[in-house]
Image: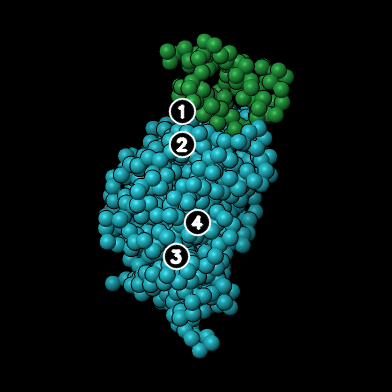
Amino acid sequence: MSTTLDTNRVELKPWLAERVAGYLEIEAAGLDSTAPLAELGLDSVYALTLCGDIEDAFGIEVEPTLAWDYPTLDLLTEALREQLGQSR
Amino acid sequence: MKESAVDRETELERRFGDPFDDDNPVGFGALLAADERAELLPEGERLLTEWGCNLEFVPARLGGNWRGVDELGRRLRPVFRRDPALGLGYGVTSLMASVNMWVAGSMEQQRGLAAELRMGHRIAVAFHELEHGNDFLRNALRAELDGDRAVLTGVKEVINNVERAESLALFARTSGDAGARSHSVLWLRKKQLSAGRLRYLPRFRTSGMRGCRIGGIAFDGSEVPAELVGAAGSGVETALRGFQITRTVLPSMAVGVLDSALHIVHRFVTERKLYGHRVSDLPHARTTLAEAFTDLLIADCLATSAARLLHLAPRNCAAPAAAVKYLVPMLLQDAVQDLSEVLGARFYLREGPFAAFGKLYRDLPVVSLGHAGPTACLLTIIPQLPALARRAWHPEAPPAALFDTEAELPRLDFARLSLAGTSADPLAAALLAEAERVDAAEPVRELAGQWRALAAECSLLSGSELGPAASAETFELGERYALLLAASACVGIWRQQRGASGFLGSDEWIHAALRRLSGRLRGDATPLPEQLAEPLFAELTRRVGERESCSLHPTPVFRSAP
């Protein structure tokens, strides 16, 4: 089993940016963190699977629709930060 | 639980009686004649009303009969054995519309719909637009919401019963944004509409299911009373949850079509003489029938297990349900295709004692009307493959109720259905657990090895390979997942039946089933060897002779009314 990331040391936003950029096959630095992910080209069905990555990396349970309800990188980062804070 | 399921299914079978009897007003003769007229047989619809068909679509907690999803699939098989158009056309599309309500509707809406269904009303599922097909996130029919009213603009096409249904579950775009929160499900009740608010499109004619009333509907800026089902913007989520149920249960009903096809063709080969032999004595015919019977059992194992998984692991069913909808129609259609070759010229005649086969052959591909096609199903699976490979496929003994159809199931919790749950899958785990047994059979070990290989390949997927632009090789990974899941379902059911002395606990059928699946995985199916084909042909012969179904658990079929 993979060990969960230490969320004190891992920056959430770059981690998420890397996941999204990986799917889009672009550089993470080029991502507009205020743009709707769907408009960046993130397939909605794929977005559901981000939750699996998050669950594995951070050891928490998240709803698959998290990326639908917080549809920009900034909003998603904030939502995830809040969920992690709550689960401590 | 099982007793009541057999009773309802058996009761419906009894009401339909012997379809081979020309004097039967709901037999093949009458059904075929109605099909020639592109109509549904009125006597058939009356029969279903008297049996209380709509109650099967209403959950028990709302006063209906629906408890187990696998039960529901079995109960409708008597209709699908005789006329899939009657099944779909009478009301299975009402089920497809209703699940949206059971998933997301308010208590008041759910009670209201239950009452309508009890009265015999229909509800049409107005989701589909020809322009967008299964890419329904791009659906364009627009609803501008304003309290409990909406202004509708756009069309829905290829919708069963759209004209005669008393209400519609309408999937409408409620925001211009890209993404998955821009659509909503609305409940549109026609009696609340003033005249001229909607326009019906001309009937769509189809190659099969010709009796179904398939039409369309257009709104030209019409203001209508329309209730939201669930929150605004929740339409895609609601639909995807509902699909997990309908993608599992519709193929289960369709198993009835292959059941009939087997009975018909077996009767044919037993009567027909060619080349100085009875066709049923010819090894090629026997093997083909044995293979088709094996494939029916595989289909039933997968559909039944996935249906029970909805109750036992509701958060893990998105990929399994898509696997059922991908694989079961393919197994059924390929088997019917093979059987058609045994039937020879009788296959394309529209008269005579075997004409029913031709209609079943035409109808079967259309059973999926307006519902997810194979590509859409694989596109549900593919993005989840890396996470599934990492987390979901580990050996673990299955919960007792997964493979034991007599075991009680917890109530189906519609709210817990998850769109992309990738934690441990009890259905996949069954084959992997079996392979670890000291006495595990070689084919089981081999398939477990294939599963590990699949997991390794899935973990390499990234980027655009996880979306609609995925390569053909990636699509093949999705197919392999479905085939391996089917193998796991077969093994799970076989293991569960080992204690009992019946056919399902035998070595012959499981070896035949795993061989068929391995052949598909390799892409080269060789015929079943005689030592596997013969026991299956013998069991098939017994069932046809005694008028029992060819499903997992045989039930009485095609018997004359007493």
Q: Colour of chain B?
A: cyan
Calculate the distance from the C-alpha at mark 2 to the C-alpha at mark 3.
31 Å
Q: What is the crowding at mark 2: few (fewer than 14 residues within 10 Å), some, or many (at least 20)? A: many
Q: Is residue B518 above or below residue B26?
A: above
SS under mark 1: loop
Q: Which residue is drawn at the image coordinates 50% and 89% (left, top)?
A: B276
| Residue with the mark numbered 3 | B293
Nearer the camera: disc 3 or disc 1: 1
User: Residue A8: x and y, percent?
Assistant: 52, 10
Calculate the distance from the C-alpha at mark 2 to the C-alpha at mark 1.
12 Å
Callout 1, which amino acid?
A: Met
* Badge 2 or badge 4: first in the primary sequence: 2
User: Residue B382: x and y, percent?
Assistant: 58, 40
Of all chains, the one bearing label 1 is A
* Badge 4 or badge 3: first in the primary sequence: 3
SS under mark 2: loop
Callout 4, which amino acid?
A: Leu
Split into 4 quadrants, where in the image is the C terminus of chain B?
Answer: bottom left
Of all chains, the one bearing label 4 is B
Looking at the rendered structure, whether the residues under marks 2 and 3 are on a common chain is answered as yes
Quarter of the image for residue B546 reads bottom left
